[in-house]
Image: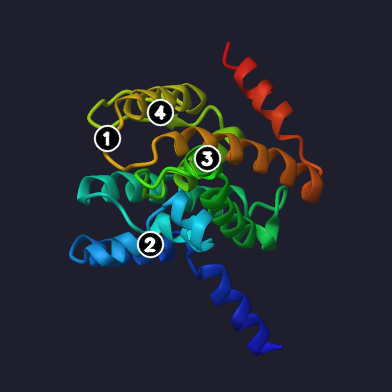
């Protein structure tokens, strides 16, 4: 009985968010100095289609274009991830003791689903490649926003609190601009598909597993602010 309690305690203390950050940083730094590693791991729809390299749907999230790209994604992920993993998903009214597993499922499924639109559009285009955890990070951000739409957030270098649901629109607006500009091998469109997946995953999983109506809570929270 004591051993079981110890195991449960250690499992509760284990941070999935921190683990993903560490692994991503290590692999990304290795790829910064080794082009072959980057080429082998990034998202390359044509290679996936022709050589059945399906692992790229996952591994592309662990390599980044440069230090700024890595820092932006991991800081964003850390800022929202710990809060979502421990404070929201693990809350008794939601997933409770299964919160961490659901958080892990959200992240890795988002890596896959966020790049599916680009896969179907570019699977015959060998010149198209992308990399980064943008889709999964976006899913985490929008999952947190759905559960706490009024939480105060700030953009970098702008010391003004912005409600979560407004921050989400600004975040997507910046992503739209960067996606239109293109040319940097960063999957900016994955921000959109990742955001959509994060919203749907949260609504459906909460309803099926906890009988919790996320959409009603979201609407009521916004109404109460006006």
Front of the two marks 1 and 3: 1
Mark 1 and mark 4: Cα distance apart in space: 20 Å
**Sequence order check, earlier mark of 4 and 3:** 4
Image-based side of 130 in relation to 139, left or right: left
Q: Secondary structure at mark 1?
A: loop
Q: Secondary structure at mark 3?
A: helix
Image-based side of 123 in relation to 79, left or right: right
Specify few, some or many for label 1: CA neighbours under 10 Å numbering under 14, 14-19, or 20 or more.
Answer: few
Front of the two marks 1 and 4: 1
Residue highlighted by disc 3 = 194
**Sequence order check, earlier mark of 1 and 4:** 4
Specify few, some or many for label 2: CA neighbours under 10 Å numbering under 14, 14-19, or 20 or more.
Answer: many
Give the image location of residue 102, x and y in percent. 64, 56
Front of the two marks 3 and 2: 2
Q: Mark 1 and 3 residues: CB-CB less than 8 Å, in contact?
A: no
Q: Which mark is residue 183?
A: 1
Residue highlighted by disc 4 = 171
* Residue at (60, 40) in percent of width and height: 197
Q: Residue furthest left?
A: 33
Tell me where residue 137 sits by quadrant. top left
Residue highlighted by disc 2 = 41
Question: Quick one: quadrant of the C terminus?
Answer: top right
Give the image location of residue 199, x and y in percent. 62, 36
Q: Mark 1 and 4 residues: CB-CB less than 8 Å, in contact?
A: no
* Residue at (65, 81) in percent of width and height: 5
Front of the two marks 2 and 4: 2
Relative to 153, residue 84 above or below = below
């Amino acid at each position: 009985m004591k051993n079981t309690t110890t195991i449960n305690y250690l499992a509760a203390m284990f941070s999935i968010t921190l683990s993903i950050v560490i692994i991503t940083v290590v692999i990304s730094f290795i790829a910064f100095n080794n082009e072959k590693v980057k080429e082998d791991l990034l998202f390359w729809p044509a290679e996936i289609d022709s050589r059945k390299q399906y692992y790229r749907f996952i591994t592309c999230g662990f390599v980044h274009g440069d230090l700024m790209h890595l820092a932006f994604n991991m800081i964003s992920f850390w800022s929202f991830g710990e809060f979502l993993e421990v404070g929201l998903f693990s809350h008794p009214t939601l997933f409770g003791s299964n919160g961490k597993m659901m958080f892990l499922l959200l992240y890795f499924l988002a890596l896959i689903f966020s790049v599916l639109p680009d896969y179907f559009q570019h699977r015959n285009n060998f010149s198209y490649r992308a990399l980064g955890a943008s889709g999964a990070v976006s899913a985490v951000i929008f999952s947190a926003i759905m559960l706490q739409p009024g939480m105060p957030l700030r953009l970098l270098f702008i010391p003004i609190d912005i409600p979560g649901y407004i921050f989400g629109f600004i975040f997507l607006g910046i992503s739209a601009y960067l996606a239109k500009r293109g040319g940097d091998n960063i999957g900016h469109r994955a921000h959109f598909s990742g955001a959509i997946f994060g919203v749907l995953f949260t609504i459906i999983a909460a309803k099926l597993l906890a009988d919790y109506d996320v959409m009603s809570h979201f609407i009521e929270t916004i109404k109460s602010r006006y």
